Image (tube, rainbow, N blue to C red):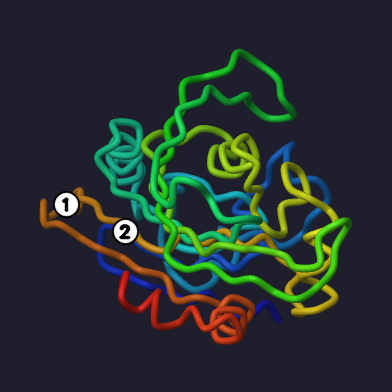
């Protein structure tokens, strides 16, 4: 039996769920072969109609909003489209970005690099860094950074494409990242997932009008890595 999803918020209008890494949100031509979907698991837990308000990449984790009516889902979708929802992600990237905080303004392509490139803006801030004594290629040590990321727009794979564009690809990104660093994390740290987590959303509740902030706890892979690198205190200070 599929594991129950962690519900972060539940009321008569909407549900916020912590999406596990690797679980596709719904059936799609971009997902490929799969027989387990978040929306199906959620329907087994929460009675009544459920309508997705947005998406998260299959390999990513974190906060996902679902409306309990088509109208609520549309209202949430409009907030996303208008940039009215503040989105905060956590990510682990190769290297130490310079400057330590900044913005990436670079048009990105759609799925499989198809279609016209669309304007996209991502803001980032380095929360912590680490240097590990593991040789890779011509470097005896490797540098990595814990980033807090706030995408201003919501394009396809925007964060992943932007960090790769500035030569700091995300760890575990099989499409835009570096296979050698992904293997290093699997072999030395036991991490076999994309290190991108939709950590926090701040929105206007579409029914009550109140400001709602939803935060998703990190999974074991994330928590273990933060502890190993001594990053927990830095993240707690940013929370």
- Answer above or below: position of 98 versus 234: above
Q: Identify the secondary structure beneath mark 2.
A: strand
Q: Residue furthest left?
A: 209
Question: How many marks on residues?
Answer: 2
Q: Residue at x 49, y 46 (%)?
A: 98
Q: Residue at x 52, y 62 (%)?
A: 197
Q: Residue at x 72, y 65 (%)?
A: 142
Q: Residue furthest right?
A: 137
Return the residue at label 2: 14
Residue 209 place in picture, x, y as percent: 11, 51
Residue 121 occupies quadrant: top left
- Residue 64 in sight: no
First of labels 1, 2 by sequence position: 2
Q: Identify the secondary structure beneath mark 1.
A: loop
The local crowd at label 1, few if under 14, some if 14 to 19, many if 20 or more residues have their Cα within 10 Å, is few
Quadrant where the N terminus sits is bottom right
Residue 218 place in picture, x, y as percent: 50, 75
Measure the alpha-carbon separation of dots 1 and 2.
Answer: 9 Å
Residue 221 numbered tag:
none
Closer to us: 153 or 72: 153
Closer to us: 4 or 153: 153
Left or right: 203 in relation to 91:
left
- Answer above or below: position of 188 versus 13: below
- Residue 129 in sight: yes
Residue 28 place in picture, x, y as percent: 69, 41
Residue 54 occupies quadrant: top left
Left or right: 111 in relation to 44:
right
Tell whether label 2 touches label 1 (CB within 8 Å). yes
Return the residue at label 1: 207
Closer to us: 101 or 24: 101
């Amino acid at each position: 039996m599929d594991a129950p999803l962690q519900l972060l918020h539940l009321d008569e209008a909407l549900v916020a769920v912590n999406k596990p890494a690797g679980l596709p949100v719904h059936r799609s031509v971009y997902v490929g072969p799969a027989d387990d979907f978040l929306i199906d698991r959620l329907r087994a837990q929460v009675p009544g109609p459920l309508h997705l308000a947005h998406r998260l990449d299959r390999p990513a984790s974190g906060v996902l909003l679902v409306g309990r009516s088509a109208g609520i889902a549309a209202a949430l979708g409009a907030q996303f489209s208008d940039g009215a929802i503040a989105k905060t992600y956590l990510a682990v990237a190769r290297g130490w970005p310079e400057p330590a905080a900044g913005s990436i303004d670079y048009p990105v392509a759609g799925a499989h690099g198809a279609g016209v490139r669309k304007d996209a803006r991502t803001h980032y801030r380095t929360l912590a860094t680490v240097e590990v004594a593991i040789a890779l290629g011509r470097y005896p040590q490797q540098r990595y950074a814990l980033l807090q990321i706030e995408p201003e727009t919501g394009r396809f794979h925007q964060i992943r494409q932007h960090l790769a564009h500035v030569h700091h690809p995300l760890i575990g990104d099989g499409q835009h990242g570096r296979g050698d660093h992904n293997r290093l994390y699997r072999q030395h740290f036991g991490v076999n997932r994309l290190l991108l987590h939709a950590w926090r959303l701040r929105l206007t509740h579409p029914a009550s009008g109140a400001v709602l902030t939803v935060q998703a706890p990190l999974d074991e892979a994330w928590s273990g890595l933060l502890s190993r690198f001594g990053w927990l205190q830095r993240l707690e200070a940013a929370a």
